[in-house]
Image (cartoon, rainbow, N blue to C red):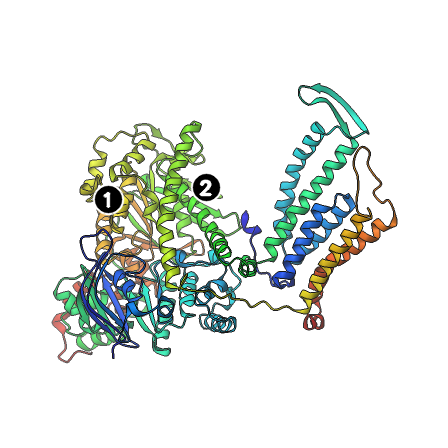
Amino acid sequence: MSLFQCQDLIYYYPDRKKPALNQINLQIEEGEFLLLIGGSGSGKSSLARVLAGLIPEFYGGRFGGQVYFQNRNLKEFKRRNLVQEIGIVFQDPEKQLVMAGVEAEVAFGLENLGLPPREMLRRVAEVMSFMDLEGVKQEFTAQLSGGLKQKLALASVLAMYPRVLILDEPTSQLDPVAAEAFFNLIKQLNEEIGLTIVLIEQRLERCFHLADRILLLEDGQIRYNGSPEKYSCWANARKIPLVPPVGNLLAQLGFSTVPLTIKKARQLLQANYNLREPSPLSTRYNPLPVVPVKANFKEGLTLKKVWFTYPRGKEALRDIDLQISTGELVAILGANGAGKTTLLKVAVGLLSPGRGQVLVPETERLDGRKKSKKNLGKRNGLLYSGIVAYLAQNPNDYLFHDTVEEELLFSLKNFQLEDQGRIEAVLNNLDLKKYRETNPRDLSSGERQRVALASLLVTQPRFLLLDEPTRGMDYGLKREMGRILTELVKQGLSVLVVTHDVEFAALYASRVIMMFDGQIISDGPVGEVLGQSFFYTTQIGKMCRGLVDGILTLPQALDRFESFHRKVKTGGEVG
Amino acid sequence: MWVSFQYQDNRRLLQHLHPVAALVYLGVLGGLTLVFAHPLYLLGLLVVILLAIQAVDGLKGWELCLKFTLGMSLLILLINLLVVRAGETVIWWGPRLPVLGELTISVEAICYAATMCVRLLDILSVFYLFNRMLHPDQVLRLFSRFAAQSALVLSLSTRMFPFLLREVHNLQEVLSIRGVDFRKGTGKERLQKYLSLFNLLLLNALENSLETAEAMQARAFASGPRSRYRKEVFRPRDFLCLTGSLLALFVTIYGQIYNYSTFHFYPQLGYLISNTMTLVVLGIILVLLSLPIIISWGWQHCPYFNARI
């Protein structure tokens, strides 16, 4: 008997002509770990909300077909009973926490269920202990880190003792370490407590190995429903980009079944390729050959001995020496709280350094007036110079006009610039021409991000700083963002990206900086920094470590392994 | 700056009192600062409040109350001197001003203004102590017994307020990046800049509120009658604090009725200590109000005491 059963499910959001879900037929078994994947707008979140009973009850719209839970139609369940069976954790922990304190947050759902105080006490104590939240029970939710907030959101759902846990991109706001810890917890819930898990995730390399089954949605329809081992080859044959890097590599190398863990993938490679002996330690840590960057530091952005301390006394930046030359794409990696965003804010002039200097070259600005270093050194001089642009994490913060064109005109007006074809050029560059008269808030998340970027690029800055530009993006959108940034760099712009996405950094950055506790601990070509890191490296980098050195990305790996093909051993594949 | 006004669990006894005992204690402290006009009583209360603030490790943040009061003192003094003519002991005769009349400075007006400054500091300090002593959720849980919906709305506001402040700050930064300088321009221009900020804030808040509402629905909000999570236990220490606070209130009423704790400033200053009962009543009130502080000290330093209360 299946736990969930969807029959001919079809759903339209209110006022939409295209169905968000179209003819979905699906069964989910008790205790299963289902990974739900798909591009933006493919219907993943809609399906999750249907399973959680939020569609159509909360959203309205037109709903067809049947959804059964334990052989009973979902419509027959009272909400109070349903939430005790099915719990859902959303993407942004900030927006799903309701109470001021941690303990009260965990108890919120239980109060809504009308449970007796003694039962609530027991459940709160049990869940907080299991989730290791005892130490922060008196804290304010607003003061918790992103990882702890998401953990708290999960705890408050678990306190209701659900049998099914639905997670809608729960780690999109977390750094890799916090995300890993979160997934370990989910794995524990699935394997040790037997919860049925439905997980939506974009960064497949983080969670692919956890899934029992993969469900790929496209345009509201199920495109793939089967085992994760077979998925990579299936997707590769159909040129579908939603594949974790290692799976993609092995599928492209011709393996019909792809292992899910790095360990097994390494075994597979070792068994099927006559790889060279692991090189000795000294040479293994040699810098990788990288294309030298055409550095021109004279025209670059320079941070000289910069220190920054927040009013509460937290030293966020310590002795930062950094130069970004023209035509560079630099990625900054590091855990949450390492000082990455503070560094960007200091570089753009939003924060004044306590000690040290931020220097930009003497340059002719867009309005023809020269801005000297001296001028820019004054308080906020750099900020209003228009030379350095900064795209913050939330693109919505940039969008409040009725049309995309007005949004761009607003930026031009503030910097007292004439249009002179700038808007046309930027819209063309970012493929936004067709949305010129559209309200930016009506666009998809990827398009919104491009409009926010356009509102900055229209003033033709020399340096572009971006904070987590790939957050919550699918593979396709990430590739598009990578293409845009590469194009901008070719046009002479310097780009500095703060990201948790190691795969993105490895593919598009020419240089990587790692930060820890307000300091730059590593700065160099992408291959050197990521190649030498144990944790902050790509999935392919992890797989190839010690076997074939100097590989981080899929093109590099394909290139190297194709040369090994001549030495292929006879023998079967490791499943 | 406002962080020092927020509750931080420093594992002090005063922070772990039963909310009823804590609220009564704070209420009595606040009430007495409004009832007393006697400078000695107000100063005595200030000492007790400061000791209580020290008992929750909050003296550092209290400096802000002091700075604010010092700033306001000048204003209070100026208004008193300009407006009040009731004092008889004039020490300076000034020029005649339009509307205000002849400017005089009397000893009574100075003393009254100084006492009001102490009262202001008392009141601010009690509010500060309230923030440091009580977790907002504790208070809300207490009130949810009488007004569940209002308590929840208040709790949501408490939760959202820091989020909203951060949002305003973020939006200001984003608009600055796009060339909006909030410090420049005429009044009308600046108003337009702030309208842009407000517009963004409203749009984001509307979108965010939908997500919060969805998360609340997913946790069974409004699915039927709610129950109340409570874990507070009424201990002997709560009984002692509550008794001390209530007794202090009764002694105050007694002192006020028999004029032991009253003081008049005009037309001439009264006696600071009119009879020994003034000191006796003051002493009793201060000892009773210091009970929670003494218990807190004992709780921290004496394991036996700790185990018994």
Gap in angstroms between the C-alphas marked 2 and 1: 27 Å
- Can residue B196 be seen here? The reply is yes
Q: Chain of mark 1?
A: A
**In this view of the protein, which residue sits in the foreground, B235 or B111?**
B235
Q: Position of residue A2 (x, y in %)?
A: 25, 77
Label 2 neighbour load within 10 Å: few <14, some 14-19, many 20+: many
Q: Chain of mark 2?
A: A
Considering the numbered disc 1 on the image, is that residue within a helix, a strand or a loop? Answer: helix
Q: Position of residue A47 (x, y in %)?
A: 25, 63
Which badge, 2 or 1, is on the more N-terminal residue?
A: 2
Instruction: Using the image, determine if residue A359 lies above or below residue B291.
Output: above
Instruction: Using the image, determine if residue A37 lies above or below residue B4.
Output: below
Circle 1: residue type: Leu
> Horizontal placement of A20 versus A512: left or right?
left
Residue visible at 29% across and 30% down? A417
> Horizontal placement of A388 versus A221: left or right?
right
**Residue carrying label 1:** A488
Question: For the residues tagged 2 and 1, is the chain the same?
Answer: yes
Label 1 neighbour load within 10 Å: few <14, some 14-19, many 20+: some
Q: Quadrant of residue A54?
A: bottom left
Mark drawn on residue A352: 2
Circle 2: residue type: Ser
> Horizontal placement of A184 versus A546: left or right?
right
Considering the numbered disc 2 on the image, is that residue within a helix, a strand or a loop? Answer: loop
Q: Quadrant of the C terminus of chain B?
A: bottom right
- Can residue A174 be seen here? The reply is no
